[in-house]
Image (spheres, grey):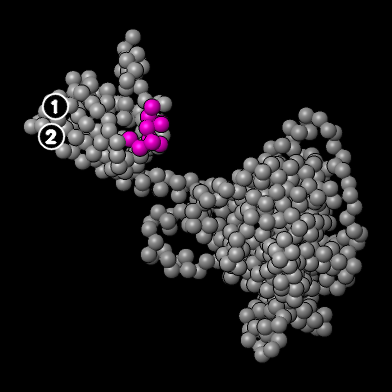
């Protein structure tokens, strides 16, 4: 226990503290922007980012992953806030937390194993594109100074690590923000700053209970939104967790992460914040800046609050160009560039799944929809592929009076039609043996196909023998097959 505590919290103190500062700075403009998207005061997003990061540092299942207010969640709140107001948003955030905790206890995170590698790659690429697109408003209709500052920021980020001694000691994104802020203040450049994004809060968050009636009508209003927020929040968190697992070559407890997200959202709702989830952009910033443990997440949340409440005069002067440079670095680092090279050697179905996930996610800005389409296509391609791996050989026995069919492969809804076409029902033989020792029956559709084969042979006066069913297949066949039930057969064949 003590060893695990030390490993998760204090094994990388310097890296975690420095990366936490970078993440906190990057969280400020995004939290404000997401608040604006949701139609709420900037402090709602900032309080949410603070409380989510601090709580998830203790309750989450993935050390080093950053959770805060996110754009994907903000998009789902727009109609709720517009039609019912801020207090209903707080109530929805609380219900979202409860549903996520339930999901954790139901071990719904285990469903992630059904998300294929091509879907994850598409998800990552789509997020990288969305992160880059989110920076375009800051690079549109601006003076050349903004482009120069952004280019200088990227130069610092990518070249500073090569500076002897200090290059490896300080995270280059932090150096980028400090240097460009100093330049902007010294030269008095007229460019957008963090302060232009919105007014920063000047007080600490306080405990509050949503001012809504506790009745069925309220539940009817908030439940649909809570379900959507739960699904999108957990999906983005699980995908981000998978990506951070790969970046750090470590494993995480995804069911604990579900519960942690729920606890964090309950805490957020009680502190006047909007629902949030894991953030891939900030999580990548944290890892790239040297953050690995829970301390980095905790420090990011604490520093965020300190900066916006006590250091707002300084923080408000950070040029947006510096943060744009950091986020462009994130988008470049997030995008799976090898996936473009692999298009030539990967199967067409894999490429279609990846590209469809990217296209749907980018076009709808809905991560859940993109992943849903990707998983659906991957499932269909897999079912079609496995369905084609079915071989039925025919052998003659006893001088033409007996025929043996040997079935090899998987019989289920995608291969059942092919299974049925493999038999010659018009052939005049006394007995047919169907050898199923190397076959597996998966569903009712497969059992029905077997029923039809047996019934058609018997209708032609042929005796049918089934041999070799494995235990699992025999269980489903014994339970659902009707070929030995005369009444059921009569009814199936249209009798009265």
In the rendered image, the vertical position of residue 285 relative to residue 189, given as above or below: above
Nearest the eye: 36 or 73: 73
Q: Residue at x 58, y 67 (%)?
A: 249
Quarter of the view holding residue 418: top left
For this view, does 452 lie left or right of residue 336?
A: left
**Which residue is under mark 2?**
397
Question: Which corner quadrant of the image does residue 417 belong to?
Answer: top left
- In what element is the residue under mark 1? loop
Vertical relation: 397 (above or below) 8: above
Tell me if residue 473 is in the magenta stretch.
Answer: yes
Quadrant containing the N terminus in the rendered view:
bottom right
Is residue 266 located in the magenta-colored stretch of the structure?
A: no
Residue that appears at 52% across and 60% down = 121
Q: In this rendering, does residue 310 appear at all?
A: yes
Tags 1 and 2 touching, CB below 8 Å: no
As helix, strand or loop, the secondary structure at mark 2 comes to: strand
Q: Quadrant of residue 347?
A: bottom left
C-alpha distance separating marks 1 and 2: 10 Å
Where is residue 251 drawn, in percent x and y? 60, 61
Question: What range is drawn magenta here?
Answer: 469-478
Query: Counting other residues with Cα less than 10 Å from the Cα at mark 1, is it few (<14), some (14-19), or many (20 or more)?
Result: some
The reply to whether residue 39 is visible in this rendering is no
In the image, what residue occupies the spot 90% across and 58% down?
Answer: 204
Q: Which residue is mark 1?
A: 429
Q: Quadrant of the C terminus?
A: top left
Q: Position of residue 285 (x, y in %)?
A: 67, 69
């Amino acid at each position: 226990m003590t060893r695990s505590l030390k490993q998760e919290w204090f094994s990388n103190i310097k890296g975690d503290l420095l990366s936490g500062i970078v993440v906190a700075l990057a969280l400020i403009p995004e939290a404000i922007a997401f608040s604006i998207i949701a139609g709420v005061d900037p402090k709602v997003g900032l309080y949410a980012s603070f409380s989510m990061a601090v709580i998830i540092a203790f309750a989450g299942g993935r050390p080093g992953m950053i959770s805060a207010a996110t754009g994907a969640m903000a998009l789902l709140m727009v109609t709720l806030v517009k039609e019912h107001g801020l207090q209903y948003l707080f109530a929805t955030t609380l219900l979202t937390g409860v549903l996520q905790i339930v999901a954790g206890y139901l071990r719904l995170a285990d469903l992630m194993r059904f998300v294929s590698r091509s879907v994850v790659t598409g998800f990552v690429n789509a997020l990288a594109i969305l992160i880059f697109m989110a920076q375009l408003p800051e690079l549109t209709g601006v003076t050349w100074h903004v482009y120069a500052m952004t280019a200088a920021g990227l130069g610092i980020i990518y070249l500073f690590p090569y500076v002897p001694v200090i290059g490896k000691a300080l995270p280059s994104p932090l150096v980028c923000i400090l240097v460009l802020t100093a330049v902007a203040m010294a030269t008095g450049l007229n460019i957008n700053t963090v302060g232009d994004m919105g007014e920063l809060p000047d007080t600490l968050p306080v405990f509050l209970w949503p001012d809504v009636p506790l009745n069925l009508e309220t539940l009817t209003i908030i439940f649909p939104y809570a379900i959507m927020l739960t699904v999108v929040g957990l999906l983005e968190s699980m995908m981000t967790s998978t990506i951070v697992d790969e970046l750090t070559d470590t494993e995480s407890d995804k069911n604990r992460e579900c519960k942690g997200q729920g606890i964090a959202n309950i805490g957020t709702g009680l502190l006047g914040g909007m629902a949030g989830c894991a953030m891939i952009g900030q999580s990548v910033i944290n890892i790239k800046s040297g953050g690995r443990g829970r301390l980095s997440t905790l420090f990011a949340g604490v520093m965020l609050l300190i900066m916006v409440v006590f250091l707002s005069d300084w923080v408000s002067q950070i040029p947006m160009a510096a943060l744009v440079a950091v986020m462009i670095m994130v988008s470049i680092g997030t995008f799976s560039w090898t996936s473009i090279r692999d298009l030539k050697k990967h199967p067409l179905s894999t490429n279609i799944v990846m590209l469809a996930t990217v296209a749907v996610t980018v076009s709808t800005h809905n991560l859940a929809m993109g992943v849903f389409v990707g998983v659906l296509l991957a499932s269909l391609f897999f079912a079609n592929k496995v369905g084609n791996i079915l071989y039925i050989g025919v052998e003659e026995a006893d001088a033409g009076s007996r025929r043996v069919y040997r079935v090899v492969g998987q019989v289920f809804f995608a291969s059942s039609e092919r299974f049925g076409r493999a038999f010659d029902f018009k052939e005049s033989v006394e007995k047919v043996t169907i050898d199923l020792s190397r076959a597996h029956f998966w569903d009712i559709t497969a059992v029905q196909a077997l029923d039809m084969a047996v019934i058609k042979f018997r209708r032609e006066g042929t005796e049918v023998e089934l041999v070799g069913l494995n235990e699992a297949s025999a269980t489903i066949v014994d339970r659902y097959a009707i070929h030995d039930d005369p009444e059921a057969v009569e009814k199936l064949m249209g009798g009265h």
